[in-house]
Image (cartoon, rainbow, N blue to C red):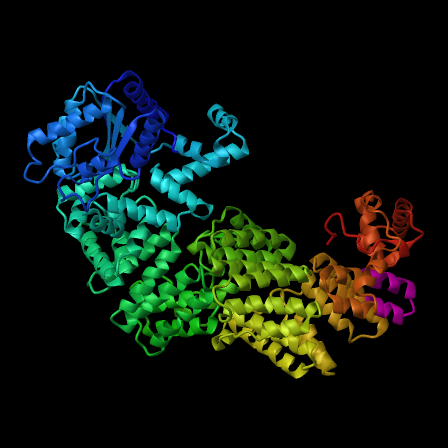
Amino acid sequence: MFRRAEEHSLLFALLDGCCAEGNSALVLVEGAVGCGKSEFLETAAEEAERRGALVLRAAGTPAERGHPLAVLGQLTADAPAGALPPPPASETAERVGSMRAFAAAVRELSTSVPVVLCVDDLHHVDELSSRYLLHLARGTRRSRVLLVLAGSAHDRGADPLLRTELLRLPHFVPLRLARLGPEAVRAMLPHATDSEAAAEVESGAESGAAAGAVAEADRLYEATGGNPLLLRALLQDPQAHPGEAYAQAVLACLHRCGPATDELAAAIAVLDDLATPAHLARLSGATEAAADRALEALSAAGLLAPTSRRGLRHPAARAAVLDRLDPAGRAALHREAALLARASGAPDTAVAGQLLAARHTGEEWALPVLRSAADQHLAQGRPDRAEALLRLAHGACPDDALRAEVGIRLAAVAGRTDPAAAEHHLAAPLAAAGAGLLGPAALGPLARTLAAQGRIDESVEVLERLAAADVRPGGGRGEDPLDGLSAFPRWAVSARAGAPADAPAAPPARLPRTGVHPAALWALPVEPEESTAARSAELFLRGATLAEGTVEPVAQALRTLLHLDGAGRALPWCEEFAHRAALREAAGWQAVFGGLLAEARLRLGDLAGAAETAAEVLSAAPAPGGGALLGAVAATRVRALLAMGRLEEAGAVLARPVPAEAARSVHGLAHLRARGHHALATSRFHAALGDFLDIGRHMKRWGLDRPRVLPWRTDAAEALLRLGEAHQAERFLADQLTTRDAADPWVRGTTLRLRASLREPKERQAMLSRAVDELQRSGDRYELARAMADFGQVLREVGEPARAAMVERRAWHLAGECGAEALCERILPGHTGEGAATVDTADAPDAGLVASLSESERRVALLAVHGDTNREIARKLYITVSTVEQHLTRVYRKLNIPGRQGLPVDLHPGVPEPA
């Protein structure tokens, strides 16, 4: 039973007065649909019977509303045999004498037992029965008779004067059942019946459980408006979320609100926020006065939204009403609603919503309204809605040029959720551009979108068409077709030495009339900007928000940070923006930032983390396969799996489809590199070399040849070494050391490692020692492990087995940390798997002892673990050999080890290594 303490107290007092004291009363219980009138009436009957009263029950129904004396017949049939006269014949039923006789019979019955008459749904009682009830109320004022009537507060029934007449009687008691308030809703919840929890909430010292109960009650109240029938139904649905029971309760309430309410409810559901009385009357065919009355009844029942909004209270209620309409009728209503909204000056978003629901684009104003509404939804953070509107608009375009414009916009919007679809949307505009069907207004945006997708060659072709027309998109002056996609966005422009904040990037010689080359978006800053670009990028990221217009500059800032300042610096930022994209459920943005996160982890030697991150991005994509961007993410996973020795799994990932046009995009280069690495791992050296050389040709042609980003020369050199072409390999490696990135520790270290294989043992030893130093500074543990493995091997060749063993232990440990089992097996054959722990941890010093080392001691010990001699350590740290010896002596004493062989292989620098 719903908690109505005040109403029940009044009822029980009237029952006690009738049964114990002989007082009569007339109670009229009113309320909106679903507010518990029938339940309250049943409570009255049960309590009356418990007090020894005779209860006579009846209820009006729409079906019997036209049958005279139908309700009176129910009352007499419920009385003991012969206690009340049967309903009179039709020819005498309307005589006052018949009504008085019925009242007298009830009075006579009350002399032996209190009589309580309960009549439900008074608004459906036939007119003649209602007159008998009125005479009974008048004629039993001094008898033990309690008349309890229940009816709708908004439907006056067949006799609209009945309530007025009842009000005039001195023993009349009105009782209004209102909807439940939020506090009453909370009191009904099973987990909120504890009085102490309620006291906590009232005192403001609510616990976590009490706060959760309040939030749950607020949610239930928001869905039901405190309507008891809706609330009971909602609590029956799984997890109390609107489902089938709730939907059926909504439909039942609407049906019981009156005969015209079904049509009106359909109009309300269709119009939603546009549901004014005038619009409802127009759409439902009712008069405006009838619409007002129906709205009042629905509002009283809690079915309508709060006063700040129009329409039904909950989306599930709206869906329940719309779902029962036949599709054709529903579409017709939405089409009419769109016309009404347009004529009344409603916002484009409201008009477009009706067009979308009707799938209607036949009006001449439909296309611009849909496009305008899509832009507004984007600005308001509703990309899914914008995409749906643009899809409808795309199908309604009357010509190829306009269809291309909408398709370009659709591609930009779809990039948030489905990168493969975003790329596909540009197929038709590209074909139209190739056929010469697009003007400058479409060519500029098309070039921008292609550049943002990394499709450099196609963007260049579009720009060449625009340049050939000698017309800029803005009418000839002032607007660059690639505005916003400069190599120097606002965060990097300020870093350019001597350049004002709004100075454009200098374009390459090609395409002089089309402004910035499309590849500029993917380029790294060069001197003199390089030294400050990473700092500027990080400053930009600190204040950046994630929105449609910021994805490209944020991604560019992350790439700059990753390649200029190291993966360790970029990693937390990549994690942050990948997390933001995931919170927005933007799979396309997740592919962008998750792909960068996977690349950063791979660059740090976190092979398992890189593979897992890439797998998560691919699984979050709307559909498997397709798309150059997703192909690049898959490529990162392939390279990580190959380094882990999982060739078969890498081959399966590599087999996922990649569009043919991906080869002409930046993302396609990642696929080529992964395919080349897989070919190397499977002894297809010529195929690998071909892929790496293709990468080089593209990067040079686009002006993106930066080994920090994609070291194709070292990849090609490795393939050439496998083919026995040492001279050609040396040429590529020497060339890489003349590039602007030659001083980068990662580039220099990986290059020196390969170049050392072309030298005699002594020179190879020195070169690998430098490679180890460089890669230690770079933070790439996997490449460091490879270099140390080679270093250990050459130490054995030159006759230094003790140093070799230490270096190999360290290399093995690093490879194990990275998950590179194949490399572990090469370094120490037979020690992978279960036996690995014994090699790694045998006689290892306690972690607490390692923590006691000073920064200087840790630096010296780390270089010793890397296999450096005391003299080499002294030279690298700019200290004397004696100082090195003193540091090592203290390290041995603190760690309680006999010498170098006991140094822990998992030692890491406590501070950044000196340059």
| Left/right of residue 788 with respect to residue 470 in the rendered view | right
| Left/right of residue 451 with respect to residue 797 in the rendered view | left
Indicate whether 440 appears above or below 416.
Answer: below
Magenta segment: 790-810
Residue 582 x, y percent position in the rendering: 51, 54
Prevailing secondary structure class for the magenta stretch in the rendered image = helix
User: Residue at the right extreme?
Assistant: 898
Indicate whether 258 appears above or below 370.
Answer: above
Q: Using the image as rendered, state which of residue 192 and residue 267 is in the foreground.
A: 192
**The N terminus - image quarter:** top left
| Left/right of residue 529 with respect to residue 188 in the rendered view | right
Indicate whether 57 appears above or below 464.
Answer: above
Is residue 791 covered in magenta? yes
Residue 902 x, y percent position in the rendering: 89, 54
Q: Residue at x 16, y 31 (%)?
A: 133
| Residue 744 visible to an observer of this rendering | no
Residue 34 x, y percent position in the rendering: 30, 39
Is residue 280 covered in magenta? no
Asked which quadrant contains residue 644, the reply is: bottom right
Asked which quadrant contains residue 716, the reply is: bottom right
Q: Residue at x 45, y 72 (%)?
A: 510
